[in-house]
Image: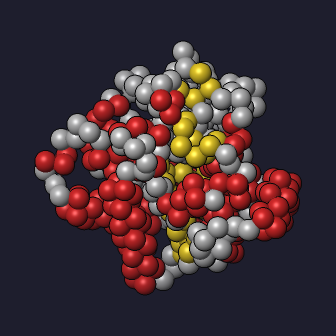
Amino acid sequence: MGVNSSSSLIFFLVLGLSSLLLITEAQKVPAIYVFGDSLIDVGNNNHLKLSTLKANYPHNGVDFPGKKATGRFSNGKNAADFLAEMVGLPTSPPYLSLTSAPNKSNAFVTGVSFASGGAGILDGSDNPFGETIAFNKQIQYYSQVYGELVKELGAQQAQKHLATSLSVIIIGSNDFLGYFKQDSSVRSKYTPQQYLDLLLSNLKNQLKKIYNLGARKLLFAGVGAIGCCPAQRLQNKTRGCNEETNYWSVKYNEGVKTLLSEMKSELKDMAYSFFDTFRALRDFIQNPTAYGFAEVEAACCGLGELRAKLPCLPIAKYCSNRKDHVFWDLYHPTEMASQIFTKLMFDGSPQFVEPINVEQLIAA
């Protein structure tokens, strides 16, 4: 369902005021703990010597304060930044930037990000990129943070702190991109259904570990319409979306929603929001003018057809009209797309976020 023109105008008026209003009006959370991949990496991969998947070079960051490339796979801020703004917190810093800090326990109290470009549910998802922090490793780091918080706050207070904080999880895209790439070796081992079942089985155990380490308010963002990213379109002779990839992305999101619902039934003190990134991205593509977009197929930064034959390297060209592009590079959204995604997460309708939005999750 699209957004009509009058509601679109209201949407952008609210969006423009959100950074001013939400910090004062939204109920605060003590911290945000972030797990995930390049969609919300704020610089962890900068600290990985063997990683080939980094964004600490131009033209990334061209719209970030100071026009500096920070390790975010974006022209500016990403969803982690916007979510922090909406609850009145600074962006949770990269975990690897704090490991040698003398006062790291104090830093952990206001939140930390474990997200890493190339990370997946399965440890093997990172193979094409060299070193990364897979989801299992991120949870190990979170366990260490949990121990530090217990030492800093005491066991009871640490549990209360984590129970009222937001735990944000955006994971799964790399697992599917790896499976559906042209030279995938994984496809010879698993049918799509077997692979999906494997992902969901691993994810169930991972989410329960996070819960057992104190997390009670979970924001989980599903995978987007991966088949519509410029890199996937480039594999299609018609330059249309890869519908097979999209089909299984939807199946994954349905599986995650079922998993979260089952966890909620079992763990009564857990609350969650599931953001349907697929539905939101599809709406951007099908109704671009309602959101202020004009270009929904090509990347803003890159080289070749759809600016998707080469990544956003310093030798690449980037568009001047970045606010009307959905995609920044081969895979990642622009700052504007991330801002709208986050707005829909925060106080959007059940069309995009269920069973409650983040604003309601904070109050739960």
The spot of residue 142 in percent (x, y) is 46, 51
Residue sitting at x 53%, y 64%: 279
Residue sitting at x 74%, y 68%: 4
The spot of residue 44 in percent (x, y) is 51, 35
User: Considering depth in this image, is 135 or 211 the residue closer to the camera?
Assistant: 135
User: Considering depth in this image, is 100 or 9 the residue closer to the camera?
Assistant: 9
The spot of residue 320 in percent (x, y) is 71, 29
Up the image or down, 308 lies above or below 125; here it is above
In what quadrant of the picture does the N terminus appear?
bottom right
The type of colouring in the image is: secondary structure
* Residue sitting at the far front: 238
The spot of residue 100 in percent (x, y) is 53, 30
Toward which corner of the image does residue 250 lie, by quadrant? Answer: bottom left
Left-right relation of 25 to 319 = right
Residue sitting at x 57%, y 54%: 285
Residue sitting at x 19%, y 46%: 186
Up the image or down, 361 lies above or below 12; here it is below
**Total numbered labels:** 0
Tell me, yes or no, if residue 346 can be seen here.
yes
